[in-house]
Image (cartoon, helix red, strand yellow):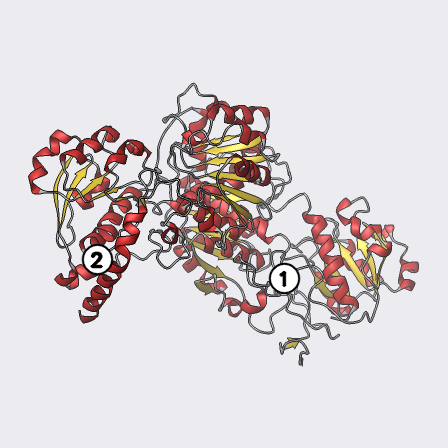
Amino acid sequence: MRSAFCKSLQVASRRTIFQTPVTSAFLTTAGSTRNIQTPRADPLSKEYKYWNREESKHGEYAYLLDMSPWSVKREARIVSLSDPNDSANDALHKGKLPYSSQLLGVGKTVDELKDLADKEPNVLFVSPSCPRACLVLPQVLEAFPTIEWVHVRSAGLDFLSPEELQSSSSIPFTNAKGAFSSSLAEYTMMSCSYFAKNLPRLMRQKQAQNWEKYDVEELRGKTLGVVGYGDIGRATAKLANAYGMRVVALRRHPEISVNDPLCDKVLGTGKASLNELMAESDYVVCSAPSTVSTRGMVNADAFAAAKEGMVFINLGRGPVVDEKALVKALKSGQLKGAALDVFAEEPLPKGHDLWGLDNVLISPHNMDQTETFMHEATSFFLMENLPRFICGEDLLNRVDVKAGY
Amino acid sequence: HFLASARGGLLLRAAPLFSLASSARSLPAASTSLALLAHHRHRQAAPKTTLAGGSTMDPPGADAYWNRETSKHGEGYSGKVIKEARIVCLSDPDDKDNEPLYRGGDKLPEGSSVLAVGTALEDFDLEALKEAQPNVVFVSHPKARGPLPDLLEALPSVDWVHARSAGVDFITSDSLSSITAQNNVTVTNAKGCFSSTLAEYTMMACSYFAKDLPRLLKNKKAKDWDRYDVEEIRGKTLGVIGYGDIGRACAKLADAYGMEVLALRRNTKKSLHDPYVKEVFGLDRLNLLMSKSDYILIAAPLTEDTRGLVGAEAISHSKDGAVIINVGRGPIIDEEALVDALQDGTLKGAALDVTTIEPLPKESPLWELDNVLLSPHNMDKTATFSLEAAEMFLFENVPRYVRGE
C-alpha cells in the first residue's frame, strides 16, 4: 500500500516535469523537421509511450486504483461511440470499470447520445463498429465540448478521415497500435516463405499427385524492405532478423530508427528513397497507414525500380498502393508475386483482376483477426490508458491527428 | 581419455567428430588423438542480434559441430599440416555438386588430394589404390550402402569416412558398423548444413495451419471474401522430437515467434541449458510431449529407437488441433496411424517433407487429404545445398584432418 502511494507521488512529479512542454509541442505542424515527439516514438528511449503486446506489461497502473484512492486525480466519464451490440466492447459496455470511471452511454449517432451532454463526459471511446464514424465524430465532439480525450479502439484511423478533424485536434487522440503487430509479422514471414518455397507449385503438384523435386529458396540472406516502419514494421523486422534477413526500413522520421539494431538501413520518405528500397529488397512489406502523404505512394515508378523477382506484401492499407500499377507489374512479371491482406476497395469486388492472378495470395483483411483481437483492444483501453487518464499519467499510443497516424 | 586444451581452457576429449546415428551399434571412440574444437565461435557483436555460437550454449566439452548460420569458413583450425589426406570418392563422377573435389589441383586444401572417383567397387583399381594408401573416403552416392563396407575392407588404410549429406541412413548397415569398428574408422557427416532452411519450412508449415492457408486458397478460387478468424503462432507450444541441429534451428525461430519449445532427445543433458527450450524430455516421455504440444516437429534421424516411434499410441495422446510436421525420416511415423488420425480429426493436419516411401506412391491416401501439406523431400534442397555440403567437407573437415585435429 505504502509503496504504491509513493509510486503515485513519484509519478505525479514526473508528470509536472514532462507534461507541459511535451503535450503542447506534440501538436507542432507536420512539416517541422525536429518533431518533439521523437524521444517518445523511439522504442529504445526510456520515455517510449507506445504499447506493444509482445513486450509491454499489462495494467501497470490498474493495481494502483485498487490500492489507493489517493492515486486518482480525476474521474472518467465515458461515452462510447460504437454499436451497442458489438461484443468486442462488452468489457466496456457490460463489464466492471476501473475505480473512478463510469460509462455514461453507448450510441452510434449524436441523437442517441446528446442527452448525455449535461453529464459532462470527458472521455470518448470510438470503435469502427460505429457506421459513418467520419461524419459522426466531429458532430459528437461539437456536441460534447467537455471531451478531454478520444480513444480509438483500432489501430487504423483512416475510417475517421482525420484530415477533417483538425479543428478539434487540441484533444489528445490515442489508438490501439501495437496490439496486432505480432500477428501481422507472422503473416509477413508466411507470405515470404509462400513464395520462397514455392507453395503454389506444391499445391499444383499435390493436386496432380506429382512427386517432383524442385529447388527451394532460402529467406536467410535475403533483404526485406519495410515501407512504413512503425510497430508492425518493427515486429516484422524482429522476425526477419531471426531468419537471417537483412532489413531496410523506410519511415517519415528516419532519425528515430537510426539506432535500431533490427534495421540494417533506415531511409526517409521521398521517391528516391522508395526506389532505393525497391531496388534492394527481395521482399517488400508495406505497413504504412493511409494518410494524405502516403496515398498512392507505391506507384508504377516504384514497381519499375523493383528488384527482379521481388515479392510485394501489403498489410497496411490498400490506398497506399496504386492498385492498377500493381496488377500490371504482377501480370508483366516485373514482380514475382504479391501477398495482399488489404485493398483499395474491401470486400474485393468479384470482377477484380487480382482474384485471377496465380501469383497473388489474397486474404480478406483478416490476417490480424484473431478471435480475441478486438476484445484485447478494448481491454487495452480499460486496463492501460483509462487508468493512466484517471491517475493523470501520460497516455499511451498518442496519435498525430493531422498526420493521420 | 581427456586432453587439456591449449585453447581457452576448454576441456577437450578424443572422440569421433560425429557418432553414427544408430544407437545400438555405436562406434568406438577413435584412438588417434582427434581433438575437438568448439567450432561455434561467438560472433563479434554486430548491431544486430545474431545467434550466439554454440560454445556459450553447449555444455563444455561438447562435440564440435559446424553450423552454417554461425560458423565461418576457415575459422577454428590452425597449426601446421602434419599429414596428407588421400581421398577416394564413392560418388557419381558427373555430380556437379562435387566440383570442388573433382576439380583438384591447387583448389584443394593444403595436403589433400583426390585419388579416385567411382560408384561401385568395379570402378576402382583396388590394387593400385591400396598401394597409394588412401585414408579418407568421401561418400555421396545414393547407392553406396553396398559398396562402402567392401571398399573399406579392401582399403584398410582408410581411417575416416565423410558422408556428404546429413542423413546417414543411406549407408548404415551391420557390415559397415563392423568394418568401421574393426579398422577404427571415424565417420562424419553434414549436419548443420541444412538446418536453417528446414527451420524456415517448419515455421511456414505452422503458419499454413494457423492462418488456414488451405481455406485462403479455396476462397481465392471461388472469389469468396470470407473473413474468418486466424490463429496466432505466438504463445503456442512446439514439441521437437529429436532435438539436434535442425531442432535447434527451429527452436530459435519458434522462440522469436514467441512459442514455447519442448525438446525430446536421447541425451537430455545436452539441452538442459539451451535458452530456446523450456523443457527437455527423454525418449520415454513422448506421450507427455504429445499432450503438451500444439505443433509437433519430428527432426530425428532414422534409427532403431525412432522407427515407428510416433504411432497410434503417441498420436492418441496429442492435443486437440495438433499439427505434425516431419522433416526427419518418413518411417519414424506409423503412416497408417497418421492417415487414420488425419481422417478422423484427431490431428488437425500434417506437413510432410518425408514419407515412408519416396517418391510417395500414387495409392497413398496422403495425396487426397485436404489437411496435409506434402512436399517431395525438397524443403532443404536449395540450388547450392549439396555443393555447400561438399565444400564443408573440403574446407572444414579436410583442413582439420590434415592438421591432426
Residue at the extreme top of the image, as rendered: A351
Comparing A240 with B382, the one in front is A240
Quadrant location of the C terminus of chain B? bottom right
Quadrant location of the N terminus of chain B? bottom right
Are the numbered discs 2 and 1 placed on the same chain, yes or no? no
Distance Cα–Cα, label 2 vs label 1: 57 Å
Q: Which residue is mark 2?
A: A62
Give the residue displayed 66% in from the left and 59% down from the top: B72
Q: Which residue is mark 1?
A: B22
Disc 1: host chain = B
Q: Which picture quadrant has residue A43?
A: bottom left
Residue A381 image offset from top left, x and y in percent: 24, 48
Side of B72 relative to B292 (left or right): right
Residue A190 image offset from top left, x and y in percent: 48, 42
Comparing A179 with A304, the one in front is A304
- Amino acid at dot 2: Ala
Disc 2: host chain = A
Comparing A283 with B172, the one in front is A283
- Amino acid at dot 1: Ser
Residue B196 image offset from top left, x and y in percent: 58, 52
Side of B62 relative to B400 (left or right): left
Question: Which secondary structure lies at badge 2?
Answer: helix
For the residue carrying disc 1, how many other residues have a C-alpha within 10 Å: few (<14), some (14-19), or many (20+)? some
Residue B48 in sight in this render: yes
